[in-house]
Amino acid sequence: RPNQILNRPFIELVHPEDRRSVQQRMHRIDDTKTYTATAEQRLTRIDGIPVTTEISVAPCSYLGEPAVQIIAQETSGRK
């Protein structure tokens, strides 16, 4: 449900064991203002079930302010 995800920090959706690496990646993007390659990442669904995803992250602007666009696609069923 979108209303359960909207306005939540993305890091809350990241699997707890992966949060440090995701934070490091986001800091690199913020520092360099460059796109990073797609990476496999575990996220945790709202119901608490972990899923494997491919994550793409890119710097962007939102309402005139620096922002980060994050696109996640579930890949759990592919393997």
Image (tube, rainbow, N blue to C red):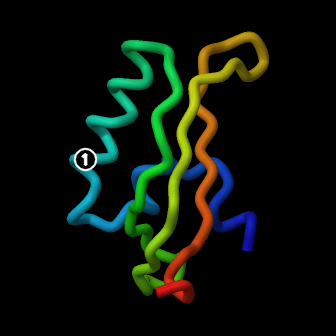
Residue 31 image point, x, y percent: 37, 14
Which residue is pictured at 70% across the width and 18% down the height? 61
Q: Residue at x 50, y 68 (%)?
A: 53
Kindly identify the amino acid type of the residue bearing the numbered disc 1. Answer: Ser
Q: Does 15 sit left or right of 13 as displayed? A: left
> Up-down: is 36 above or below 51?
above
Question: Is 28 situated above or below 22?
Answer: above
Crowding near pointer 1: few (<14 within 10 Å), some, many (20+)? few
In this view of the protein, which residue sits in the foreground, 76 or 18? 76
Residue 52 drawn at (x, y percent): 44, 74
Closer to us: 40 or 72: 40
Residue 72, percent from left and from top = 59, 58
State the residue lying farthest toward the right: 63
Residue bearing mark 1:
21
Residue 36, percent across and down? 46, 34
Under circle 1, the secondary element is: helix
Q: Quadrant of residue 73?
A: bottom right
Judging depth in this view, the residue of 17 and 79 nearest the camera is 79
> Is residue 78 depicted above or below 62 in this figure?
below
| The N terminus: image quadrant | bottom right
Q: How many marks?
A: 1
- Name the residue located 41 percent from the left edge and 51 percent from the top edge: 11
- Determine whether, in the image, residue 64 is placed left or right of residue 70: right
Please give left or right for residue 30 compared with residue 2 in the image.
Answer: left
